[in-house]
Image: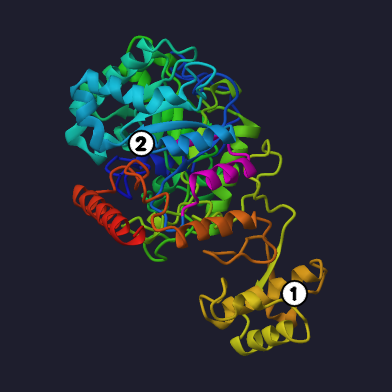
Amino acid sequence: MGSWSRGGSGSSLLTPLLFFLLSLHSLSLTVATAGSPVVVSAAGSGEPYVGVTIGTAVTNLLSPSDLADFLRAQHITRVRLYDADPRLLSALASAGARAIVGVPNDELLALGSSPATAAAWVARRVLPFAGVNSSTPAVISAIAVGDEVPTALPSALPVLLPAIRSLASALAAANLSSPIPVSTPLPFSVVEDPFPPSQAFFNQTLAKTFVAPLLAHLANTSAPLMLNLYPYYSLMQSDGVIPLDNALFRPLPPSLEMVDPNTLLHYTNVFDAMLDAVRVAVRNLNVSGSGGVPILVTETGWPSYGDRRAEPYASKDNADTYNSNLIKHVLQDKPGTPMAPGAAAQSSAYIYELFNEDLRPGPVSEANWGLFYGNGTPVYLLHVSGAGGLLGNDTTDRSFCVAADDAEEKAVQAAMDWACGPGRADCTAIQPGQGCYLPNDVRSHASYAFDAYYQSQGRAAGSCYFQGAGMVTTTDPSHDNCLFPGSKQLGNHTKSGSASNTTTPTSDAEGSAIWRLRTGREKGFSLFLRLLLSITVVIVTDSNFWT
């Protein structure tokens, strides 16, 4: 999946009409949606939920057992995987989590060409975790076949629907007590002219040959329409037309609210507008039964860092705001959308992603979509109090002390010397060879020392002043293997995650051909080299270590 495919690369995201829409004043009218109502339900039954995706292109990824403990501590019960690693699924079972498992794009040809191969894949990868009987855990909630195939691997499109049908048939033959839906995550770019939502339609080259048959199958099997949906990229491609606040779920002045001129519906955020655009596109295909196909957002999120010139909106504050507000939107407000209001129509969503995948190639932002680093240290802290306990990294009652941005370096150095000396702050972690020594610069070291003193004083008023060199922040400054004193993340996860990757010859992430890089990222040559390296390690180990 290309870095700009999230959110709709290649789609005509904006039309000149949007310039007019964004300047319309709020209308005090109650107007019915034009045409027949669009009945598109929330994904699945029960309450809407928020999950997280887990990619594995991470340097110090937690082991499956530590990951399960981490998910339990963060109250995360829904995850999306990009493969079906049995070791990870076993660990998730112990954590009480449910997972969407993926079929990588490079496996589509085999599964789409042979129903027998699809049945074997289900028997091997799915049934042991499908709750077939009392001895098998019901971990798998759905199967995502491929990922953004129309844009990521268009050559595989002819076998995508056959693969979906074969997997669904194999699951039906298993007579499971709880059916496992089978679908495929589509990029938002398959929707053309999505703004205003009332004029949206599916890409004409895909509509009749692929999307319509897909919708018919989903309707017949009660499976959701899976979408990767990114307001971030809509904002980036809007050339300033979309207000940042509109993309971040922040309230707008009435004069800036987006109003669909055809329906007179008001849109307070881009997320809902994109969902309604999909609803209109579905309705326009007029596929029997497809009006009841639920929508499941399989990816959405915001990068915390990127190239300052190319991606100025990629920041920790914006990522915190978007993901925090998304969680509140889905779990607390449950408004549905203007075209499909109410909790019953609220789509569930998976945040992309749990960990920063620092091994991802491409633009800087590609490695910075995670809520946490691979060892469990938070990249930033969400404001999610009252959201049903989801994600334990709430900042509403937490603060840290760091070096002030505008303080002179000499003042920062003097303040750090005082904190680590007369102030008796524990500055061991910033000594050479310790976890917070790098980056080796005055401001980084001073931030740790300031926070150590601030926390030792019980965050008392004035304990972060340092003659103007310090400032209080609610963003956890912990990074990589450096855990700041004020962070209440589970230290044992961080340590075990690091240790397991430094003392074991082959990490859990490297030890399985299944537990591998995100879909579409690993080329055949890379797979060959890794396999060859694994064989070499085994041979060397066998011939030298045990003799």
For label 2, the SS is helix
The answer to whether 281 appears left or right of 109 in the picture is: right
* Nearer-N-terminus badge (1/2): 2
For label 2, the residue is 188
Crowding at dot 1, Cα within 10 Å, few <14 / some 14-19 / many 20+, comes out as many
Task: Using the numbered discs, state the Cα–Cα distance from disc 1 to disc 2 in whole angstroms.
Answer: 48 Å
For label 1, the SS is helix
Span shown in magenta: 61-80
Mark 2 residue type: Phe
Crowding at dot 2, Cα within 10 Å, few <14 / some 14-19 / many 20+, comes out as many
- Which of discs 1 and 2 lies nearer the camera? The answer is 1
At horizontal 29% and vertical 28% (from top left) the residue drawn is 202
The answer to whether 298 appears left or right of 410 in the picture is: left
In the displayed structure, would residue 468 be above or below residue 275? Answer: below
Please tell me in which quadrant of the rendered image residue 540 appears.
Answer: bottom left
Q: Position of residue 333 (x, y in %)?
A: 64, 32
At horizontal 52% and vertical 21% (from top left) the residue drawn is 135
Q: Position of residue 70 (x, y in %)?
A: 58, 46
Picture quarter with the C terminus? bottom left
The answer to whether 495 appears left or right of 507 in the picture is: right
Nearer the observer, 13 or 305: 305
Mark 1 residue type: Tyr
In the displayed structure, would residue 473 be above or below residue 33? Answer: below
Q: Position of residue 220 (x, y in %)?
A: 37, 11
Query: Which numbered dot is residue 223?
Result: none
In the displayed structure, would residue 411 be above or below residue 437? Answer: below
Q: In the rendered structure, does residue 300 fall within the stretch colored magenta?
A: no
Nearer the observer, 333 or 453: 453
Nearer the observer, 12 or 105: 105
In the displayed structure, would residue 258 be above or below residue 134? Answer: below
Can the viewer see residue 150 in this picture? no
For label 1, the residue is 453
